[in-house]
Amino acid sequence: MEASPAFVRADESCPGKRGLLRASDVTKSFGPTVALHGGELCVSAGEIVAVMGPSGSGKSTLLHCLAGVLLPDQGLVEYDGQRLDAMSDAERSRLRRTDFGFVYQFGQLVPELTAVENTALPLLLERRRRREAVAVAQAWLETFGLAGLEKRRPGELSGGEAQRVAVARALVTDPRVIFADEPTGSLDSAAGVAVLDEFTGAVRSRGVAVVLVTHDARVAAYAERTVLVRDGMVTSPDTARTVRAS
Ligand SMILES: Nc1ncnc2c1ncn2[C@@H]1O[C@H](COP(=O)(O)OP(=O)(O)OP(=O)(O)O)[C@@H](O)[C@H]1O
């Protein structure tokens, strides 16, 4: 069955400054399913933007288009003034490793690797020296209160600890943008709040931009702004702010 198109409100954000990441009129279909139709979003350095909306409304598709994981059928995504569609696959992959970080609902840690190896992985993929990569990873684990757990594998960590490792891994390359898709969706609320407090504290202190997909208004409340993606419905930024505050 053909899904209703999802509309993302043209977003008059990044006032008076050029956004670090900008999607203009982005459309993406999967076969007959129009997942995004005319999506607009602008994110500035140091800003956390929450993306909310019902299941299947196109939030993850928007996030993947912004991150260059998916290329839109129409429209543009620009990062730091560069069009992602003008880059080769290899250039986009490199950008994702160097400038972007990712946190997903289930940390997606490599089960065979220890906490410090998981955290160091993005640096090792960039061919940084192992000793240096491990030292940086170790420092991030300490920042997130995980000193002493470096040698544990994901199966030997609590959900909250594993998610902190995933957040440390996203930050280890010193990215300029982090894409977080339900980053605390698999945690109970106390553990989720603790991870979110630490995550948002770390990104704010470093001026990292964050695109934060969530169903949860309590999670969205950590963001400066909220954008709504909703099948067949165009929401205004004012409406979005009301949702964030509720
Ligand atoms: N790779 C794909 N192939 C086919 N259809 C897809 C694919 N990815 C997403 N879709 C469809 O596109 C629409 C938007 O999906 P998307 O995952 O972006 O929604 P979402 O808002 O992130 O949902 P959820 O909150 O449940 O994660 C849905 O109808 C989904 O079934």
Image (spheres, grey):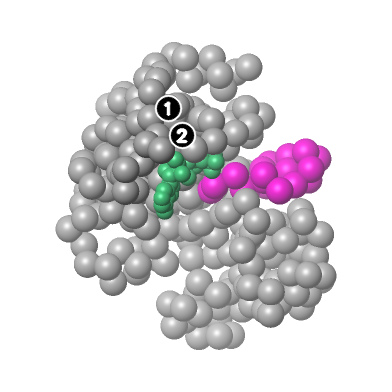
Mark 2 — residue? 57
Inspect the image, locate mark 2, and give the three-letter code of the amino acid beneath it: Ser
Which secondary structure lies at badge 2? loop
Residue drawn at (50%, 74%), measured in percent from left and top?
Answer: 123
Residue drawn at (76%, 63%), measured in percent from left and top?
Answer: 146
Which secondary structure lies at badge 1? strand
For the residue with label 1, is its CB less than 8 Å from the closest atom of ligand 1?
no
Residue 186 forms part of the magenta stretch: yes
Tell me the magenta residue range. Answer: 180-199
Residue drawn at (50%, 18%), measured in percent from left and top?
Answer: 241
Q: Nearer the viewer, residue 126 or 243?
A: 243
For the residue with label 2, is its CB less than 8 Å from the closest atom of ligand 1?
yes
Inspect the image, locate mark 1, and give the three-letter code of the amino acid beneath it: Asp
Q: Is residue 32 left or right of residue 196?
A: left
- Decide: is 203 above or below 130: above
Q: Is residue 60 at all visible to an observer of this figure?
A: yes
